[in-house]
């Protein structure tokens, strides 16, 4: 089941702009709708919603979370094969593959290169075939 947007929605478009899979539609100042087939139930829409208009599949309100507390991908370089699946799946362009230090260097891996772009959805972790990416909240 997908998340839903309730009548509390004031049409601010924050959820629509942040959704990593473009599952949310709606015009400014109008009720927004989540496409059930596209929703990955990551919770980003609820974390950003200023009025608490998002509910999960159990009908529970998804609470707002300050952006600095959103989870971020942490790559275990020793497990990463630099296959780039995570880079390709990330619609926010937050991940890249490192460049070799010298010709013939095979020690490359995925990295979170654009932390501000990352919304913490976890798609990179979910699709990593090597299970090299863990989602963690950083306490800097």
Image (spheres, grey):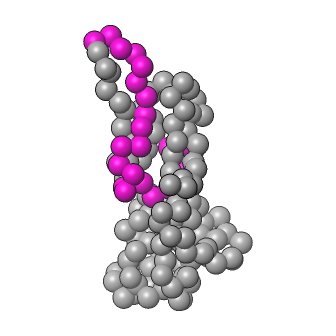
Image position, residue 19 (x, y; %): 44, 63
Above or below 103: residue 1: below
Residue 105 left/right relative to 65: left
**Residue 127 in view, yes or no:** no
Image position, residue 25 (x, y; %): 40, 73
- Magenta part mainly helix, strand or loop? loop
| Image label count | 0
Of all residues, the one furthest to the front in this rendering is: 140
The quadrant holding residue 99 is top left
Per the image, is 117 magenta?
yes
Q: Nearer the viewer, residue 136 or 44?
A: 136
Magenta part of the chain: 103-127
Above or below 119: residue 109: above
Residue 107 left/right relative to 59: left
Give the residue displayed 52% in from the left and 42% down from the top.
74
Image position, residue 100 (x, y; %): 32, 21
The quadrant holding residue 57 is bottom right
In which quadrant will I find the N terminus?
A: bottom right
Give the residue displayed 43% in from the left and 28% down from the top.
109
Give the residue displayed 41% in from the left and 47% down from the top.
90
The quadrant holding residue 101 is top left
């Amino acid at each position: 089941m997908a998340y839903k947007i309730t009548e509390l929605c004031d049409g601010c478009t924050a959820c629509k702009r942040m959704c990593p899979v473009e599952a949310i539609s709606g015009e400014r100042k109008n009720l927004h709708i989540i496409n059930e087939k596209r929703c990955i139930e990551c919770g980003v829409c609820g974390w950003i919603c200023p009025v608490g208009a998002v509910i999960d599949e159990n009908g529970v309100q998804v609470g707002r979370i300050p952006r600095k507390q959103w989870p971020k991908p942490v790559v275990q370089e020793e497990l990463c094969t630099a296959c780039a699946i995570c880079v390709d799946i990330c619609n926010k362009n937050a991940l890249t593959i490192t460049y070799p230090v010298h010709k013939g260097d095979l020690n490359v891996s995925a990295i979170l290169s654009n932390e501000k772009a990352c919304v913490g959805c976890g798609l990179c972790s979910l699709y990593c075939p090597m299970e090299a990416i863990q989602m963690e909240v950083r306490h800097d």
